[in-house]
Amino acid sequence: MSRTSPVLPDGWTLVALQSISSTNDEAARLAEGGAAEGTVVWAREQTGGRGRRGRHWTSPIGNLYSSTILRPACSAARAAELGFVAALAVADMVPAGRNVRVKWPNDVMVDGGKIAGILPESSVDVRGGVDHVVLGIGVNVSSAPQLPDMRYPGATLGGSVEDALQMLTTALAARLGQWRREGFETVRAAWLAKAGPLGLEMDVKLGDDLVHGRFAGMDRDGALLLETTAGPRKIVAGELLGQAA
Ligand code: BTN
């Protein structure tokens, strides 16, 4: 197992911490203070790791917790595209031979288990543009903590956290470059190529409602497209509950 310090992409800066409540909170604090794009906050453990929808993200030593500061010149709506960019970067880290799938909106599944969680958080300036985005990514490297409300088994990447951070930041820099040069259409196509097949049955939780349908793709704004018995549905915010492997 390698114990060498992670090498980050050119121009990126590492803030390495032993323990912090949440790397996203620390990165947001640094961003408010003017920290540059490509600043990566990495902690060996989190005592208050946060997941989507206000959930807790169990964060023991041995897994990867990182938050990258980005300063994209785009609208807040377009900043949501960065969650898909991050999911592709995580998928790129997974060695060949394992079955990798992305699951809407930002989950990455390996051999049927969730391997990573992605929490993009944007800060909007007074004119409605993006001041910064904190792209929080947690990767199960050596353990897959099971949370009480988790509907999927966990999966692990294996190897060392240092290697995982280096692979993640390398992949993230490459995918961000692709997004900037070629736009969301290329990202969307790459994401769809790694998503489940069209027609796959799934359940989506929308508030207290449950919508059942068949996967019909993702639209140009990042919304989930579902074919239901009542006709096509476009889902902007929701939680995918069931998806056959
Ligand atoms: C999810 O609910 O799937 C998203 C989980 C995101 C966890 C990561 S770990 C690094 C960063 N810091 C946090 O507090 N959360 C994100």
Image (cartoon, rainbow, N blue to C red):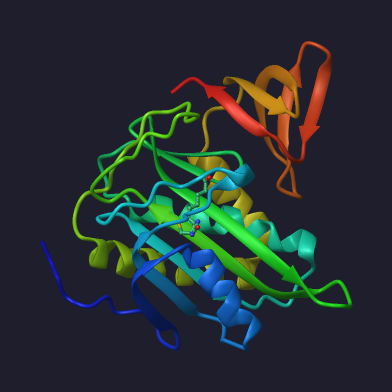
Residue in front for this viewpoint, 230 or 204: 204
Question: Does residue 170 appear in the picture of this structure?
Answer: no
Residue 243 in the figure: left or right of residue 155: right
Residue at 56% across / 55% down in the picture? 119
Can you give x and y, in whole percent of width and height, for residue 127 in the image? 89, 77
Can you give x and y, in whole percent of width and height, for residue 33 in the image? 62, 87
Q: Is residue 6 above or below residue 196?
A: below
Question: Does residue 42 appear in the picture of this structure?
Answer: yes
Can you give x and y, in whole percent of width and height, for residue 148 in the image? 45, 29
Residue at 81% across / 74% down in the picture? 129
Q: Residue furthest top?
A: 229
In the rendered image, which quarter is residue 83 located in? bottom right
Residue in front for this viewpoint, 54 or 210: 54
Q: Is residue 228 above or below residue 225?
A: above
Residue 25 in the figure: left or right of residue 159: right
Residue in front for this viewpoint, 223 or 107: 107
Residue at 16% across / 75% down in the picture? 4
Can you give x and y, in whole percent of width and height, for residue 179 in the image? 60, 66
Where's the C terminus, which quadrant? Answer: top left
Q: Residue furthest right?
A: 127
Number of on-image labels = 0
Where's the N terminus, which quadrant? Answer: bottom left
Residue in front for this viewpoint, 234 or 207: 207
Q: Is residue 78 above or below residue 3?
A: above
In the rendered image, which quarter is residue 89 located in? bottom left
Residue 141 in the figure: left or right of residue 122: left
Residue 110 in the figure: left or right of residue 124: left
Q: Is residue 57 above or below residue 154?
A: below
